Image (spheres, rainbow, N blue to C red):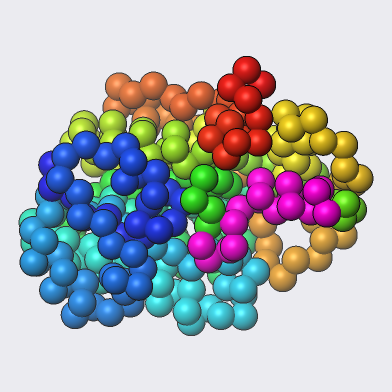
Amino acid sequence: MRTLLIGSKGQLGSDLIDVWSGDLSAFSHEEFDVCNRDQAHEIIARERPELVINTAAYHRVDDCETNGTLAFQVNALGAKNVADAAREAGAAIMFISTDYVQDGLKGSPYVEDDVPRPLSLYGTSKLAGEHLVRQSNAQHYIVRSSSLFGVAGASGKGGNFVETMIRKAKADEPLRVVDDQVSSPTFTADLASKLTELAATGRYGLYHVTNGGQTSWFGFAEKIFELMGLTPSLTPISSDELDAPAGRPAFSVLENRALVGAGLKKLRSWEDGLAAYLNAKGYISPAA
């Protein structure tokens, strides 16, 4: 399958390059500006892909609150530009979205049919992107995932949560981490592998794809340090104490129902994904 990837230098994009089978043309955000409609149409028409994977996102959640215009330009209008260009070229589109389209009030894992109610401009802009992809009439996969961490690090965030925790622990900085926001941390290598399987099914639609299980950010940090044998000063705090600009769901675990319905297996646990990540980075041995 001829595939065009947008976001080749990001965490997920880097892993997609490693695992994708078939003809793949990969573009960084600098090479393919999703906000540039004419460029999107020109590149996709030239490359003639069968599938376009759009991983581009403005995902600094708190910054989106003060840069709402940019958030919507990238996450919503950018998604529309790519989807429209894909449709005109006869290609399908795979758009990567987020668990932050939900408000976290359900109290149990969200299924694909649950009505989204984002709390932040980031979540709202990604949800708008989902709607615009659907309205493009391109054949599409919309894939929501959660709390991504990958070997390449998130270029827009200067790393990822795991690296931030390790860096601060090694610098003997006291760590205060929220314990009332629960999700399913997802290793991008696992997500990338599952996306290759999903694309091969040809079963378009909305999918939740995350590693299994759930934890808070505090629990995530605890597991990182447990696996690495570190004992930093780690204190749980509430979201109210953190007082971040953007609202975040208290419980945004995603049930991977549609994935199973498509005949695909769920991903391994987030703990196993984390161990694989730490091994890939050389922080622990394979036996850990």
Specify whether 237 is left or right of 116: right
Q: Is residue 203 above or below residue 85?
A: above
**Which residues are the magenta region?**
155-171
Asked if residue 166 is among those painted magenta in the image, a careful observer would answer yes
Write the residue at 33% across / 24% down.
264
| Residue 43 sits in quarter | bottom left
Question: As displayed, is residue 105 above or below residue 68?
Answer: above
Residue 56 location, x and y as percent?
39, 62
Quarter of the figure with residue 247: bottom right
Q: Residue at position x 82%, y 36% from top?
A: 230
In this orientation, does residue 236 appear?
yes
Q: Looking at the image, how many numbered discs can be counted on the residues?
A: 0
Nearer to us in this view, 50 or 202: 50
Quick check: is 81 in the magenta stretch? Answer: no
**Residue 214 seen in the current view:** no
Q: Residue at coordinates 44% horizontally, 56% vertically from top-left? A: 10
The quarter of the rendered structure image containing the C terminus is top right
Q: Is residue 236 left or right of residue 141?
A: right
Reply above or below: 93 against 207: below
> Residue 184 vs residue 51: left or right?
right
> Residue at 35% across / 57% down in the picture?
8
